[in-house]
C-alpha cells in the first residue's frame, strides 16, 4: 500500500503524462487517473480538471465525450465554478449536446444541484434532443434521464419534457418507447390536472401497467411529503385507476 507521499508522486507523474510531459502516454495516464479519481485531494483535482478543460477545448469530436465522462466521474468533488467552466467550454461546440449528456447521465441528481437555471436549460435541451437520436440505446437513456431530472424542471421545462416523452409514445418500435412511459409515470406527481389528463389520453391501452407501476413507486417514495397540489393530482390519478383496478392494485 502506498503512503501519501508515494501516491502524490504517482499522481503528479500521471498528470504530467496527461499533458504529454516527460514522454508519458497521454491515454494511459488519463485512464489511470480515472481509476484513482475519488482519492484525489483538492489541489490534484484542480490540476486534473484544468487538463480536462484544455482537452475539451482542443480535442476532436471523437474524444470530447470521453473527457466529459471523466469530469462526470469527478462530479461529486466539483464545485459550481468547475461546472461553470465546463459549460462555458462546451458552449457552441458542434457536439455540445452529446458532451452534456456524457457529463450528466448517471450523475444527474448530483450535478443538477450545482447548476444554475441557464445550465439546467441546456441539460434539458440536450436530453430532449437525445430522444430523437438514431442510436436507440442513447434515446432510451435520454428518456430515463428526463424522468430523473424533471423534478428540477421549471413549468416551461416540464411542459417541454412532457411533450417530448409523449411524442415518444407514437412509435412502439422505438427502443425508448417503454422508458418514455415509465418516465411519465415518475413525473406525474408534478403535473397539473390538464397535463395529467393529456398523459392518460396519450397512453396506449396495453401500456397502463408500466405507467401506473412507475407512478406507484414514486408515490410510495414521497407520500409523506405531498403538498396540496400533489394530493389533488393523486386524487385525480386514483379516479383514473378505478378504470384499471387489476393494473393499479392498491395505489390508493
Image (tube, rainbow, N blue to C red):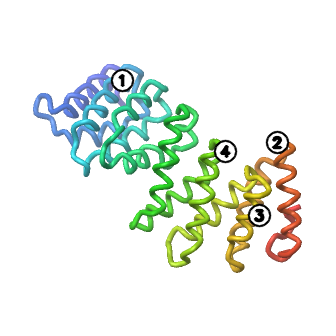
Q: Secondary structure at mark 3?
A: helix
Distance between the Cα atoms at labels 4 and 2? 20 Å
Mark 2, other Cα within 10 Å: few <14 / some 14–19 / many ≥20: few
Residue positioned 39% across, 38% down in the render: 71
Tag 3 residue: 197
Distance between the Cα atoms at labels 3 and 2? 23 Å
Q: Secondary structure at mark 2?
A: helix
Q: Earlier in the sequence, mark 4 or mark 1?
A: 1
Q: Earlier in the sequence, mark 4 or mark 2?
A: 4
Q: Secondary structure at mark 4?
A: helix
The one nearer the camera, 63 or 117, is: 117
Q: Earlier in the sequence, mark 3 or mark 1?
A: 1
Mark 4 in CB contact with mark 2 (< 8 angstroms): no
Placement of 162 over or under 212, stated as above or below: above
Please identify, in this view, whether the residue under mark 2 or under mark 1 is nearer the observer.
2
Q: Earlier in the sequence, mark 4 or mark 3?
A: 4
Residue positioned 73% across, 56% down in the render: 188
Placement of 130 over or under 3, stated as above or below: below
What label sits on residue 60 in the rendered view? Answer: none
- Does residue 201 appear left or right of residue 98 in this picture? right
Tag 1 residue: 46
Distance between the Cα atoms at labels 3 and 1? 49 Å
The one nearer the camera, 230 or 77, is: 230
Give x and y (percent) for residue 59.
22, 42
Tag 4 residue: 155
Tag 2 residue: 225
Mark 2 in CB contact with mark 1 (< 8 angstroms): no
Mark 1, other Cα within 10 Å: few <14 / some 14–19 / many ≥20: some
Q: Which image quadrant is residue 68 in?
A: top left
Give x and y (percent) for residue 86.
38, 33
Mark 3, other Cα within 10 Å: few <14 / some 14–19 / many ≥20: some
Mark 4 in CB contact with mark 1 (< 8 angstroms): no
Amino acid at each position: 500500500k502506498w503512503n501519501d507521499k508515494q501516491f502524490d508522486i504517482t499522481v503528479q507523474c500521471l498528470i504530467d503524462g496527461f499533458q504529454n510531459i516527460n514522454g508519458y502516454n497521454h491515454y494511459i495516464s488519463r485512464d489511470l487517473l480515472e481509476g484513482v479519481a475519488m482519492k484525489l485531494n483538492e489541489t490534484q483535482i484542480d490540476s486534473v480538471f484544468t487538463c480536462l478543460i484544455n482537452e475539451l477545448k482542443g480535442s476532436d469530436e471523437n474524444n470530447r465525450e470521453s473527457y466529459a465522462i471523466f469530469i462526470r466521474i469527478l462530479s461529486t468533488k466539483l464545485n459550481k465554478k468547475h461546472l461553470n467552466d465546463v459549460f462555458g467550454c462546451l458552449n457552441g461546440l458542434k457536439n455540445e449536446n452529446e458532451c452534456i449528456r456524457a457529463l450528466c447521465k448517471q450523475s444527474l441528481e448530483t450535478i443538477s444541484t450545482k447548476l444554475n437555471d441557464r445550465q439546467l436549460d441546456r441539460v434539458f435541451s440536450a436530453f430532449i434532443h437525445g430522444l430523437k437520436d438514431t442510436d436507440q440505446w442513447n434515446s432510451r437513456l435520454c428518456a430515463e434521464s428526463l424522468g430523473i431530472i424533471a423534478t428540477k424542471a421549471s413549468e416551461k421545462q416540464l411542459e417541454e419534457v412532457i411533450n417530448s416523452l409523449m411524442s415518444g409514445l407514437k412509435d412502439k418500435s422505438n427502443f425508448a418507447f417503454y422508458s418514455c412511459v415509465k418516465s411519465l409515470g415518475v413525473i406525474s406527481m408534478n403535473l397539473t390536472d390538464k397535463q395529467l389528463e393529456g398523459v392518460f389520453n396519450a397512453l396506449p391501452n396495453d401500456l397502463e401497467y408500466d405507467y401506473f407501476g412507475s407512478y406507484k413507486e414514486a408515490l410510495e417514495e414521497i407520500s409523506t411529503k405531498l403538498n396540496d397540489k400533489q394530493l389533488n393530482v393523486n386524487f385525480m390519478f386514483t379516479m383514473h385507476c378505478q378504470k384499471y383496478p387489476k393494473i393499479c392494485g392498491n395505489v390508493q
